[in-house]
Structure formats: structure tokens, C-alpha cells
Image: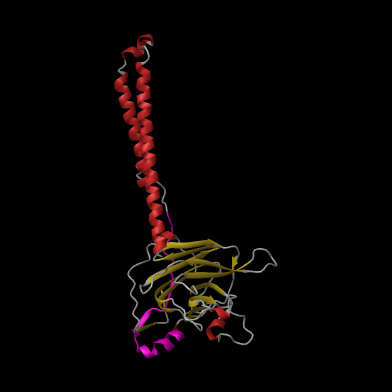
Amino acid sequence: MEQLQKKNRNSTSHANAAYIIIIILIVVFVIVAVISLMIFWYSVDTSKIGPLEHIPMKTLLYIFGGILALSVLFVLFNSRYELYFQKRNKIGIDRSTPGFSLFWKPGKSTKKEDQKNDLIQLYEVNSDEFHMTTPDTYSVSLEMNVLDTRSDDKYGPFRHILHRGSKDIKDFKRDSPGSIPKGRGGLNDGLPTEMNPGIFIDRFTNDLIIFIDTDSVKQGEYGFRESVRVTDIPLKRPFSIHLTLHDQMLEVYINCRLAGSKILHGIPRAVPNNWYGLTGFIPAMAQIQNMKLWDTQLYAQEIRKMCGDIKIDNTVIPKKCDLK
């Protein structure tokens, strides 16, 4: 995450430098043009031009140069700060903020020894609690606090945070007879058979990986398991993540700022509409709360307004659902 912010700062500084260079070049061009006109004028015998002999050309050149310079500077300033002196069409998203369903809202305090069993039961949402119109248009957000990303397993299974799809990972026992061997991206690696989306911590680093299962656009071809990686997520510091999917465009936001995007090769797959959090044989060492689900895509302008202070108390358990 820190690397992403550094890249954004570098991009902004480069853009500002380029903008200043353009202004300097234009000013130099205007000065050279005015000087060239003056040299040309004084090198010509105005007495042979007739009516122009009595025109105060020096004054006119100064006025012309000043007007030209001010015009250029105004255009540049207006392009950067968008000053308008007439009514213009509305720019942006012309719709009311979409409604959402809120799950896993923090509830009352509970004993720490009961925490694990209670949360395993509560971090689930079935299809009756949240209806989805299509598998390729939705949005989800989650508040989380990742405490540790280290793995004691040299094969490093993915650590589960959230997924919508098959429930096989919930009760799977690693190295079960007949299961796909480790390292092939199956259940033995902590990944469910079907998911759209799936949010996991990488096997060996504190990177976040978002999976989307898709079907090929060409009939008869196998589907894909596509992904977006968000590097270096915060540790022991609460943050929010937003995913929004529209057709084949996936966007990932961390703390309401774009952290990754991908145009999917395939069509997002219709998987079982059941959501699971911190489940499987190796859930992430993390706390999650306040999952919001939208049956529509969200725009960057809308997501930027959704972040505020995040407080996560590990002595409380979440409520089941709260519709908004």
C-alpha cells in the first residue's frame, strides 16, 4: 500500500513538472514572437507603407503582446482549475447513492473464549438475505484489521478473508483422500472450487489477492481464475476495501482510493450466492466487520465519499444483518 501511495505521489509531481514546463515554453514563445515583430517593424521603412506611418506601432506591439500573453495564461489556468463564466452541463454521476445491505455490524461484547466459535457461525450470508440480479454487476465493501500474515506452512496456503461461491472450503480437511495436491490452486491451497469474488492474503507475503472465476467468451473453452494483486496492505491498522464489478471491469479500492483494476478475459461466472468470511482450514489472522453489498456497480466519485474513521474492537461480535 505504501508503494502504491509513493507511485501516486511521483505521478502527481511529474504531471505538475510537465505543466510548469509547458507554461514556460509558451511564455518564451510569446516573448520571442513579440520581439520578432518589433525587429521586423523597425527594419522596415514605414514612410513607404503609407497610412501606417502615423500608427504608434511600438505601443500597439506592447498591447498585442500583453493581450496574447494574458490570453495564453488564462487558458492554461482555466484548464487546470476549471473556471467558467457561463452555465455548463452537470459533470459527474447523475443518480442518488445506491442502497446497500449491511452485514456483520459490531454488536455487544462477548467473552474472548467464545469469540472464535461465534464468529465462524456469524460470518455467513445466504442467498435469501441478499439477492443479486446478475453475477457480473455488484459491489462489496469490508472493514478489516490484518494482525499477521506469516504462515507456518512451507507450502503456504492462501489465507481466507471473504468469498462468495461454493461452501466446500468451509468443511474441507487438508490432504483429504482424493483431493488435488498442493500447489495447484485447489482446496488444498485454501481456495474454494468456485468464487466470484474471493479475497485472500497471499501465501507468503502481506499482499491481498482478489480472485474472480470467469467463463470463456468462446464456447467450448475452459474458464479462467483471474486475479488482481494489491501489494503491501496495512498491518495492525484498520482499513477498508471496496470491490466493484461491472461487466468485465473489476476495480479494487483501499481506503477509498483506487489500488488496482483489471479488464477480465472471461465473463464473470454465476456461482452460488452465499458469502463466507474467515472460513476454511486456514482463515486469515484478521478481524472483519461491516460488510456492505450492492446489487449494482459503484463509481469512483461515490466510493471516495464512503470512507471515515474505522474502529474495530476485538472484544465484540457482529450482528447478523442490518438493511440500509
Residue 29 visible, this angle:
yes
Q: Which residues are magenta?
A: 92-121
Q: Residue at x 34, y 68 (%)?
A: 308
Q: For residue 322, what is the image quadrant?
A: bottom left
In the rendered image, residue 13, in percent from the top left (x then y), is placed at: 37, 51
In the rendered image, residue 260, in percent from the top left (x then y), is placed at: 47, 62
Q: For residue 33, what is the image quadrant?
A: top left
Residue 87 visible, this angle:
no
Q: For residue 268, what is the image quadrant?
A: bottom right
* Placement of 71 over or under 146, stated as above or below: above
182 and 87: which is toward the camera: 182
Q: Quadrant of the C terminus?
A: bottom left
Its colouring scheme is secondary structure
Task: Report the residue that reaches farthest toward the front.
Answer: 154
* Placement of 28 over or under 194, stated as above or below: above
Q: Residue at x 66, y 69 (%)?
A: 222
In the rendered image, residue 125, in percent from the top left (x then y), is placed at: 48, 80
317 and 161: which is toward the camera: 161
Label tally: 0
189 and 102: which is toward the camera: 189
* Placement of 144 over or under 65, stated as above or below: below
36 and 256: which is toward the camera: 36
Direction from residue 310 to residue 128 in the image, left or right? right
In the rendered image, residue 167, in percent from the top left (x then y), is placed at: 55, 82
Q: Quadrant of the N terminus?
A: bottom left
Q: Residue at x 37, y 31 (%)?
A: 30
Q: Residue at x 42, y 54 (%)?
A: 92
Magenta run includes residue 106:
yes
Task: Report the residue that reaches farthest toward the right.
Answer: 220
Magenta run includes residue 191:
no
